[in-house]
């Protein structure tokens, strides 16, 4: 597949998953996992709690977190590195990993800030709908749905997050022109 086809595929998958299954963090992560053949049912399960701005609190956007989790699966610290017996080796490896991963996360955040002005779910909703919603209130969720929240608005955020994450992965791998 070409770069363009990969980016379109990951964006379409994430968009469709958000429409069909909801849970923005899982939808971004699942699309990235499938397109880049990443393992991780446990990671996908862990992503569940980040929807709606972390446990439906309107805090950090779950789509952003799904992207961060995908980047972490690829470039994060593993158990062997974390528990390396040599403290100096452990420290240097951690520094290298955190620098690389931190740079990628900063770039992903920049895309969110550029497009939505924030990585906060409630702020993104204000940008998209002119207001935020109480994600625990069924009537509020119905209103969000009535205003296109699950048919186009939130799926667009999710699709964008997956595409931006895929771009960063491809760039990091030297696959992006």
Image (cartoon, grey):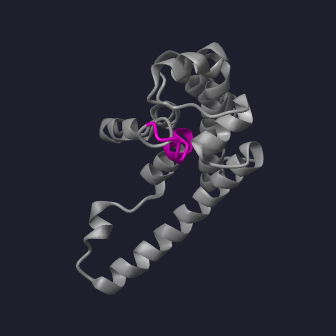
In percent of width and height, residue 165 lies at 60, 44
In percent of width and height, residue 98 lies at 49, 68
Q: Which residue lies furthest to the top in this view?
A: 146
The image shows a total of numbered marks equal to 0
In percent of width and height, residue 157 lies at 65, 33
Instruction: Determine the residue positioned at 73% across, 37% down.
Output: 127
The image shows residue 13, relative to residue 79, as above or below, that is above
Q: Residue furthest bottom?
A: 88
Q: In the rendered view of the protein, which quadrant contains the N terminus?
A: top right
Give the quadrant of residue 107: bottom right
The image shows residue 20, relative to residue 164, as above or below, that is above
State whether residue 55 appears in this view: yes
**Residue 8 inside the magenta-drawn segment:** no
In percent of width and height, residue 3 lies at 70, 36
Give the quadrant of residue 83: bottom left
Give the quadrant of residue 54: top left
Residue numbers of the magenta segment: 56-66
**Residue 57 inside the magenta-drawn segment:** yes
Residues 31 and 15: in front is: 15
Instruction: Determine the residue positioned at 35% across, 81% down.
Output: 89
State whether residue 174 appears in this view: no
The image shows residue 19, relative to residue 28, as above or below, that is above
Q: Is residue 163 left or right of residue 89?
A: right
Q: In this view, does 76 lie to the left or right of 111?
A: left
Instruction: Determine the residue positioned at 63% across, 31% down.
Output: 159
Residues 169 and 149: in front is: 149
């Amino acid at each position: 597949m070409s770069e363009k086809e990969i980016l379109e595929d990951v964006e379409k998958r994430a968009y469709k998953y958000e429409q069909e299954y909801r849970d923005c963090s899982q939808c971004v992560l699942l699309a990235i996992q499938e397109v880049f053949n990443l393992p991780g049912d446990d990671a996908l399960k862990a992503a569940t709690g980040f929807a709606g701005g972390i446990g439906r609190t309107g805090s950090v956007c779950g789509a952003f977190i799904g992207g961060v989790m995908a980047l972490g699966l690829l470039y994060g610290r593993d158990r062997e590195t974390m528990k390396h017996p040599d403290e100096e080796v452990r420290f240097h490896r951690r520094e290298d990993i955190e620098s690389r991963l931190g740079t990628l996360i900063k770039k992903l955040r920049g895309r969110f800030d550029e497009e939505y002005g924030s990585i906060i779910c409630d702020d993104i909703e204000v940008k998209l709908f002119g207001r935020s919603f109480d994600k625990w209130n069924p009537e509020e969720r119905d209103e969000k749905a009535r205003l296109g929240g699950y048919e186009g608005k939130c799926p667009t955020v999710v699709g964008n997050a997956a595409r931006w994450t895929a771009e960063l992965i491809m760039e990091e791998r030297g696959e992006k022109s």
